[in-house]
Amino acid sequence: MPIILAPIDRELKIVRIAADEKTKKHLENLGINVNGSIRVLSSSGGSVVVMVKDGRIALDGNLSTKIFVA
């Protein structure tokens, strides 16, 4: 499921990132990569705030529909 539909405050595993190589590389530099863990802190209006390792990252609606979790 896309991260925008994921339950809040639950540890999730990233299974796929459906973006171009430049965007994938940028997300990887932020710590968001396939098989990594991520936790959704809040979600509203398409934007999502996630916890990756020890940092919080805000994702816009465009990016949050391209990151798939299980």
Image (tube, rainbow, N blue to C red):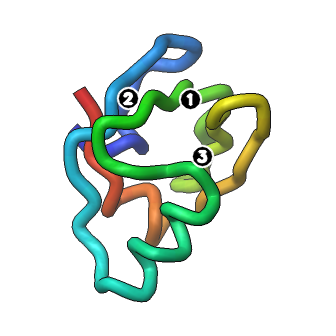
Q: Is residue 11 above or below residue 14?
A: above
The amino acid type of the residue labelled 2 equals: Ala
Residue 66: x percent and y percent? 32, 62
Please give the residue where the numbered disc 2 appears in the rendered image: 6
The one nearer the camera, 40 or 22, is 22
Please identify the quadrant where the N terminus is shown: top left
The amino acid type of the residue labelled 1 equals: Val
Residue 48: x percent and y percent? 59, 46
Residue 17: x percent and y percent? 28, 59
Q: Is residue 10 above or below residue 24?
A: above
- Circle 1: is it few (<14), some (14-19), or many (20+) Cα within 10 Å? many
- Residue 40: mark: 1
Tell me which label, 2 or 1, sits earlier in the chain: 2
Measure how far apart labels 2 and 1 are at the Cα level. Answer: 7 Å
- Circle 2: is it few (<14), some (14-19), or many (20+) Cα within 10 Å? some
Q: Is residue 34 above or below residue 61?
A: above
User: Which quadrant of the view contains residue 12?
Assistant: top left
**Judging from the image, what secondary structure is the residue with disc 3 in?**
strand
Q: Is residue 6 left or right of residue 20?
A: right
Q: Is residue 53 left or right of residue 70?
A: right
Please identify the quadrant where the C terminus is shown: top left
Which residue does the image show at 30% across and 37% down from the upper left? 35
Please give the residue where the numbered disc 3 appears in the rendered image: 48
**Judging from the image, what secondary structure is the residue with disc 1 in?**
strand
State the residue lying farthest toward the top.
10
Circles 1 and 3: CB distance less than 8 Å?
Answer: yes
The amino acid type of the residue labelled 3 equals: Val
Which residue does the image show at 49% across and 62% down from the upper left? 28
Tell me which label, 1 or 3, sits earlier in the chain: 1
